[in-house]
Structures are given as structure tokens and as C-alpha cells.
Image: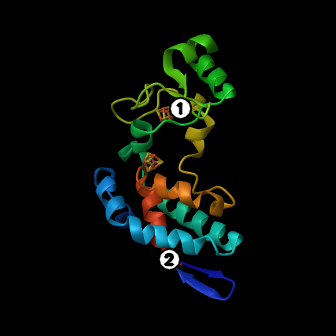
Amino acid sequence: MKSSAKGVSINISILRTDIPEPSALKQLSRTHAATLKRSIRRLQSMNPRNLDDLVHRLHDEAFSVYDCLNCANCCRSISPAIRHSDVNEMAVKLKIKPSAVVETYLYLDEEGDYVFRKAPCPFIDGENYCNIYSHRPKACREYPHTDRTRFYQILSLSLKNAEVCPVVFAILKKLEQA
Ligand code: SF4
Ligand code: SF4
């Protein structure tokens, strides 16, 4: 697919074969760390709207061919930041008090955010389904953030996310061509 960015013609698409196996990601992100970092620095000077258009299209392409049920790396290795409203939602789903949600599942990290006490997340099942899917935290709904606006603001965070999320890794690799 072709997108045009202010005089620059960008011919980039994501195929299923561009998205690595979750088990290979740690090694891959180490191997590609230097080139990804260089690319991120360059992207910081790209027109923000053009960058958003491109990243959002790559996001849509990637998630149209990739099923998170084959992965669940995010749910198994990192915790979302959990807001008070998320605690209330989880309490409704679990039919317990919000204070019991905090007591049982959460702790305050050094940045003052609630996070899950342990990884993998207590709500991921053996087939990678989330047991509280309809009431999951906002940060879970938004991860891996490749469809948000002003993507330039989270380029560095995305570099970290590329160690966890095969789709983010594939998008950042494609952006090296932008
Ligand atoms: S609450 Fe659900 S979506 Fe969020 S980390 Fe846990 S299993 Fe994954
Ligand atoms: S969002 Fe990324 S890390 Fe999480 S399950 Fe989907 S592909 Fe895997």
C-alpha cells in the first residue's frame, strides 16, 4: 500500500510474515536495538500527522492479520497501570469490593500507580483469554498504543514495547523505511 507524506512517497505494508514469533522477540529486539534506536531518533523529526497516518495504517494492517490470542506476551510479562476507575470496573466483574480487588491483586509501584502483584496477569487463562475482558483496565484496551494520536510522544516507550509486542516490533522495523 502507498501513502503520501508531504512530497515523500512511502511504500510500506505489513504482512503476517513481518510479525515475529513472540518467543523470538527478546533476541530479535536485542539484535536490532541499535538500528531501531537510530530510526526512532530520525522519526522524531517527521511531521507528526504524517507519522500518525503511517503508524495507524500499519497498526490496522498488522492487527487485521495477527491474532493476539497467539501471543499474550503483554499479559504475561508486563502490568498495565491501573486507575481507580479500573479497580471499580474489575470489582463489578469479580463481584467483590474495590478494596478487595486492591488487596488481592494489586500494589502501588514506585511511580504511585496500581499494578498487578505478579506476572503473568492473574486474569489470563491457559488459552490466552482474559477472564475480565469486558471490564479490563483502560491501559489493556489501549496497548500497544500504535493507534493513538501524537505517536511521536511515545516513540521511546514504543522502543521498549517492541521487546514485548511482536506487532510493535514489526511496525518499528517498517518505519525504518519511512
Ligand atoms: S486484565 Fe486481561 S487484558 Fe489486562 S493484562 Fe490481564 S489478562 Fe491481559
Ligand atoms: S498487543 Fe502485542 S504483545 Fe499483546 S497480545 Fe497483542 S501482539 Fe501480543
- Amino acid type assigned to the residue bearing label 1 in the image: Tyr
Residue lying at 53% horizontally and 50% vertically, measured from the top left: 144
Q: What SS does tag 2 mark?
A: loop
Residue lying at 69% horizontally and 61% vertically, measured from the top left: 150
- Residue 125, placed above or below residue 157: above
Q: Is mark 2 within 8 Å of ligand 2?
A: no
Asked if residue 71 shows in the view, the reply is yes
Asked whether disc 2 touches disc 1, contact meaning CB atoms under 8 Å apart, the reply is: no
- Amino acid type assigned to the residue bearing label 2 in the image: Ile
- Which residue was labeled with disc 1? 133
Q: Which mark is residue 12?
A: 2
Colouring of the image: rainbow
Nearest to the observer: residue 86 or residue 12: 86
Residue lying at 47% horizontally and 53% vertically, measured from the top left: 160
Question: Residue 141 appears in which quarter of the rendering?
Answer: top right
Find the distance from the CA under tag 2 to the CA under tag 1: 33 Å
Judged left or right of residue 83, residue 169 is: left
Residue lying at 36% horizontally and 66% vertically, measured from the top left: 32
Percent across and percent down for residue 76 are 39, 37
Nearest to the observer: residue 3 or residue 118: 118
Sequence-wise, the earlier of marks 2 and 1 is 2
Question: Residue 120 appears in which quarter of the rendering?
Answer: top left
